[in-house]
Amino acid sequence: MISKRKAPAPENIITGQMNLIFRARMLWRDMTTWLTMYMFSLYGGYPNLQSIANQIYELPLEYGNFMKLIFGDKVSDDYINLISQYVIILEYLFYYQLTGDQNAASNYTQQLYQNINQRAAFLAQINPYWQENTWKTLLTTFNNMILEQSTALLTKQYDKSIDIFNQLLSQSSIIGDYFSEGILQHLQSQTHTSDIIKISTVL
């Protein structure tokens, strides 16, 4: 007798999808939070800068683990490399903004946008449900807000920095939604819906 694979209950599918969306959102919100804390520490001269930097360095690995479950080791490693470059470039840019070296700051700003273009192209290549232009817009908007936040904190415009932080949180949710929606569409086209539940329990 041929056994039939039991279909997952609809409520389990919905829960799995919600877990994926929640985790994707949290990854981007973590990026927003730790980068803002890093800027506060750097510009305020606090002694916990390296500890915060270590937290930031963990984020690409978290992204990579997320990607590995869906796209495999090679894609994961390549994405970790790209997003690690992004946070390192940001750290250099923050430093040169603090020291007033405009030439160096301009150079690293250009590198940021080059990295964004690379990431947008990469993500569109690995998943047909992600569009390169959409990723460019989302990531560029996020990056512009980070740079605005840096300027606000550097010039001690703290009320403005709070408004920007709230905008960053909203943008991180938008990015997380697009990220997770593309993954869900990819999984639904490639695998059984029960795999969504399995993956979501690992994250």
Image: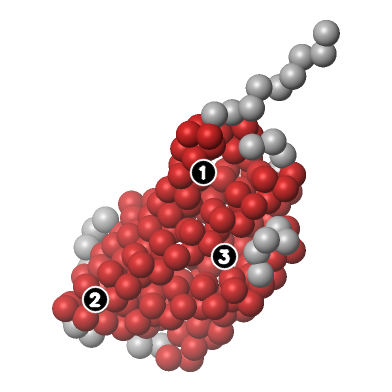
Tell me the crowding category of disc 3: few under 14, some 14 to 19, or many 20 or more residues within 10 angstroms, Cα based.
some
Q: Position of residue 93 (x, y in %)?
A: 44, 77
Residue at horizontal 63 percent and vertical 67 percent from the top: 119
**On the image, numbered disc 1 is attached to which residue?**
17
Q: Residue furthest bottom?
A: 103
Q: Is residue 116 left or right of residue 15?
A: right
Label 2 amino acid? Asp
Label 2 or label 1, whichever comes before in sequence order:
1
Residue at horizontal 41 percent and vertical 61 percent from the top: 173
Q: Is residue 92 left or right of residue 41?
A: right
**On the image, numbered disc 2 is attached to which residue?**
163
Q: Position of residue 79 (x, y in %)?
A: 63, 57
Determine contact: label 2, label 1, CB under 8 Å: no
**On the image, numbered disc 3 is attached to which residue?**
85
Residue at horizontal 22 percent and vertical 73 percent from the top: 162
Calculate the distance from the C-alpha at mark 3 to the C-alpha at mark 1. 30 Å
Tell how many labels: 3
Q: Is residue 130 left or right of residue 156?
A: right
Calculate the distance from the C-alpha at mark 2 to the C-alpha at mark 1. 31 Å
Q: Position of residue 70 (x, y in %)?
A: 66, 44
Label 3 or label 2, whichever comes before in sequence order:
3
User: Which of these two is toward me, 153 or 119?
Assistant: 119
Label 3 or label 1, whichever comes before in sequence order:
1
Q: Secondary structure at mark 3?
A: helix
User: Which of these two is toward me, 170 or 143?
Assistant: 170
User: Which of these two is toward me, 154 or 31?
Assistant: 31
**Closer to the observer: label 2 or label 1?**
1
